[in-house]
Amino acid sequence: MKRTVFITGATSGIGLACSQRFAANGDNLIINGRRTNRLEELKSSLEKQFSVKVHISAFDVQDKQAVFSAIDNAAIEFNNVDILINNAGLALGKDFFEEADMDDWETMIKTNVNGLLYVSRAVIPFMIKRNKGHIINIGSVAGIEVYEKGNVYCATKFAVDAISKSMRIDLLRYNIKVTAIHPGAVETEFSLVRFKGDAETAGKVYEGFTPLYANDIAETIFFCSSLAPAVCINELVITPTAQANSIYIKRVLYKPGLSEQGFV
């Protein structure tokens, strides 16, 4: 049975991988992002490859008025949303608390927390009318354990965890499922954005171990969304095998002339 899936931040990383995975299943999509040209390219590609219906909803999740206006103006499409994937989010900077850029703090809060709240609040009434739905919020292992220089980014992901728990309680009476997915190290544009285009620094984040990739998370999200109506995975932490939590990663350094591996 075809479903309608609304994905925020669909133009790259996990959001893009989710768009491709659900379209491959024959599900219709509503894709969101700030870059209209990328959304149009993705729409064309998915419709051509998978013969599904794709609706573009371009807005910045930080902008409350834009969120509600876009969703209200496309009520026909949003009226049948079965799954909402709150994927839009970012990290900016990795600095000690007293040295961090407060503009970065505000952008992370507005995107990771306010954006998730605005989109959810705008979409949930459509699910309530149908007495069903599934909300999947993308958190992070950073929302479970704080790490050095993570400060406000970690705080925003702790908020996603708390919001997900609260949603699950409040929406229980409407048969709406809520799942929180907490990924560890996933190699996408995430670190490139965090370090503001510094490719060398971003690349070092994933050196010495095999990280997760966007498709791994998309496959996990798809699985969680495809269970029986009476089954809900409330939360799920997923990391690479080399990662124990938000702090500990086993890295393998290959040194020329040495026959053994060195671990850091």
Image (tube, helix red, strand yellow):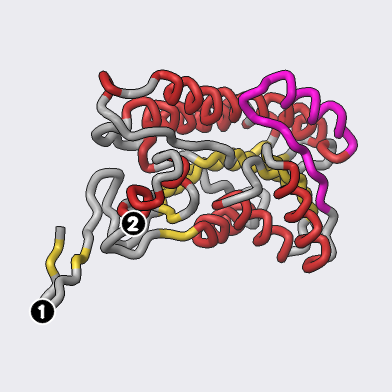
x and y, in percent, of residue 15 in the image: 61, 49
Judged from this view, the residue extending furthest toward the right is: 76
Say which amino acid is labelled 1: Gly
| Residue 64 is covered by the magenta coloring | yes
Position of residue 241 in the picture relative to residue 102 (left or right):
left
Q: Residue at x 33, y 24 (%)?
A: 100
- The front one of 84 and 263 is 263
x and y, in percent, of residue 254 in the image: 19, 71
Q: Which residue is mark 2?
A: 206
- Looking at the rendered image, the quarter that the C terminus falls into is bottom left
Mark 2, Cα crowd under 10 Å, few <14 / some 14-19 / many 20+, is some
* Part of the protein shown in magenta: 54-76
Q: Which residue is mark 1?
A: 257
x and y, in percent, of residue 94 in the image: 33, 34
Q: Secondary structure at mark 2?
A: loop
In terms of sequence position, does the residue under pointer 2 or pointer 1 come before the other?
2
Q: Residue at x 76, y 45 (%)?
A: 30
Q: What is the count of numbered marks?
A: 2
